[in-house]
Image (spheres, grey):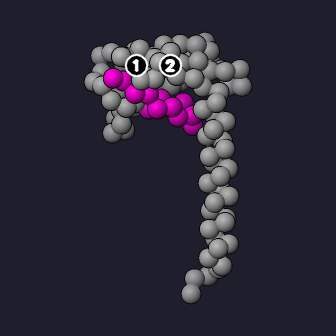
Amino acid sequence: MSGGCEPCQRKGNGVKEDAEAELEDDITANIIAYPNPSHGIFTIRLKKDIEIVNNFLISIYDVKGRFVKSMTIEKRTFDVDLRAHPAGLYLLKTNNLNIRLAKE
């Protein structure tokens, strides 16, 4: 027998997962990527709840986790150009924020 109540352990894990899901929903509600999918140029818009500070850096990775490019962000709306890269899924990361981008 394990060292604890199995339903209690599941509930504890579920609460943590629910909190993480809520935080992720909060983050993605404040960042818009369009058009998604695109043919290579994405516009990213940060809503007012995201604070832009000096050296606000985004990094783009391909679906295999390989680094593609990085950019320093100074405005709430900016473009990401992936036309030189093959079609596929890309991940935009910054300060623990993640967005999936799909290039057709």
Tell me where the magenta segment starts and ends, as one range: 91-104
For the N terminus, the quadrant is: bottom right
- Name the residue that disc number 1 marks: 38
- Per the picture, the main secondary structure of the magenta-coloured stretch is strand
Residue at left offset 66%, top offset 42%: 23
Residue at left offset 61%, top offset 54%: 17
Q: In this view, does 81 lie to the left or right of 5?
A: left
Q: Are marks 1 and 2 in contact (CB under 8 Å)?
A: yes
Find the residue positioned furthest to the bottom. 1
Residue at left offset 46%, top offset 32%: 100
Would you identify the image quadrant in which residue 48 lies?
top right
Question: Dot 2: what SS?
Answer: strand
Question: Dot 1: what SS?
Answer: loop
Q: Is residue 61 left or right of residue 84?
A: right
For the C terminus, the quadrant is: top left
- Name the residue that disc number 2 marks: 34
Above or below for 57 versus 12:
above
What kind of residue is marked 2? Answer: Tyr
